[in-house]
Image (spheres, coloured by chain):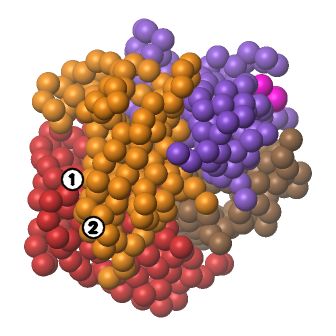
Chain colours: A red, B orange, C purple, D brown
Amino acid sequence: MPKAIGRRIWAIAEGYIPPQSTGTTRELISHETICILNAGDKDAHVEVTVYFSDRSPVGPYKFTCGAERTLHVRVNDFKDPEPVPMGTDFSSVIASDVPIVVQHTRIDTRQPALALLGTIAFASD
Amino acid sequence: MPKAIGRRIWAIAEGYIPPQSTGTTRELISHETICILNAGDKDAHVEVTVYFSDRSPVGPYKFTCGAERTLHVRVNDFKDPEPVPMGTDFSSVIASDVPIVVQHTRIDTRQPALALLGTIAFASD
Amino acid sequence: MPKAIGRRIWAIAEGYIPPQSTGTTRELISHETICILNAGDKDAHVEVTVYFSDRSPVGPYKFTCGAERTLHVRVNDFKDPEPVPMGTDFSSVIASDVPIVVQHTRIDTRQPALALLGTIAFASD
Amino acid sequence: MPKAIGRRIWAIAEGYIPPQSTGTTRELISHETICILNAGDKDAHVEVTVYFSDRSPVGPYKFTCGAERTLHVRVNDFKDPEPVPMGTDFSSVIASDVPIVVQHTRIDTRQPALALLGTIAFASD
């Protein structure tokens, strides 16, 4: 089986947490997720920096994705150094000390049927 | 933290502003967005050229995305040199003087529940 | 402005025309689209080959995307050498004589609210 | 026509089978699909490894995608060595002995109108 796969720096230009939800469970509340795969045999220490349109970037938000594990982090749950406001445009950069793979997903339940958006993030050279 | 990330030339082959909306707020009117991340320490001067199926390209539409900022521009809001018509197939090329990351999103509320489409743009070599 | 952008060979591993629609207009009938951007100054002669799970590939379907034009072709409209059946898994390879950019979109109106799927295609080396 | 296209190692960081469905047909039950294109002239022997957040990876799940064929495999149907649980975050790595192209799709019918998510997978270097 392949071991470490991916890159150390990733970027997601799109970011927006819909400020309303018709869903009531945690799964069906509108949210934005950063999905990380660490297929290698060393833990990944991951730092996320969030960029805004009208103020300085905030972060790093720190996470550990274990060796041979996946970690799907919800931006809605970011707390330290500060929460990411809903209804606000943002972007994010994801930096890791070992190669990882990053994908971006949004679930939007503002109207009474959910919508999904997902894409591979940009892998920096 | 990483500094300038991305490329200077990007392309989005898909483009279409749905001509109807069931949403009534600005957020829920059908729209097409170009999301730009400038993680570097110099302002990005961005020029968007829009390509059509049956006439010459239009542009450049000019934007500035500040250093360490994100800019989500709605194609619906393009005005100068001319608006982009709704219900029309188009593509776009995004050129910047510094590296940026570009993602494409559409929100479509033609039917009574929104749909989302999103993808990373093509990063030119 | 940038001229020719992209690659000559692209692949879309996903393909499926939903066999039902709640929409009744051409725009809201479930369909699959291959979006092509030719930003260069020479016409692109494009050949699409369609791959199936249980029989030999079909094609080429031939299209011309003019210089500095976009072409959004609906797989539903493919006729020569034969139509692509609905409700069937397929993949496609897009070959051009000049560099182009290719994106894949599906609109699915099987249930009474449309869904969208879109992604950049794979740019071959 | 082009022959073998793609890469031998692919990764999909996102994975989640929605645990409910409003659809009742096989097509409209919430599911996650890995779409494979083998445009080359040799059969592709494909092994999928599934990564979780809290336990060791499971696999390989083995598939053959014939020469010049496509194979769309539903993660819901994975059985050997064990099923992939619904409502659980996962990631996957797809390894092939010949070049292939991989795309990821989810159809989510938890609410009474389907949603789609799709993206090209990450092609490892």
Please, what is the three-letter code of the amino acid marked with disc 2? Ala
Left or right? Give the position of B62 relative to D82: left
Q: Nearer the viewer, residue B99 or C1?
A: C1
Please, what is the three-letter code of the amino acid marked with disc 1? Asp
Q: Please name the residue that numbered disc 1 is placed on.
A: A89
In the displayed structure, D116 sits above or below A9; it is above
Dominant secondary structure of the residues highlighted in magenta in the image: strand
Marks 2 and 1 sit apart, C-alpha to C-alpha, by 16 Å
**What is the number of the mark on residue B67?**
2
Residue occupying the point 46% across, 34% down: B50
Circle 1 packing at 10 Å, graded few (<14), some (14-19), many (20+), is many
Q: Nearer the viewer, residue A91 or C38?
A: C38
Residue occupying the point 31% across, 32% down: B80
At which x and y percent is residue C36? Answer: 60, 34
Query: What is the chain identity of the residue bearing mark 1?
Result: A
Q: Do the residues labelled 2 and 1 touch (CB within 8 Å)?
A: no
Residue range highlighted in magenta = C58-62
**Farthest-out residue, top:** C24
Q: Can residue D72 be seen in this view?
A: no
Q: Quadrant of the C terminus of chain C?
A: bottom right
Q: Nearer the viewer, residue D20 or B33?
A: B33
In the displayed structure, B23 sits above or below C51; it is above
Q: Is residue A51 visible?
A: yes
Q: Where is residue C14, by image quadrant?
A: top right
**What is the number of the mark on residue B30?**
none
At which x and y percent is residue B78? Answer: 30, 33
Q: How many labels does the image show?
A: 2
Residue occupying the point 42% across, 28% down: B16
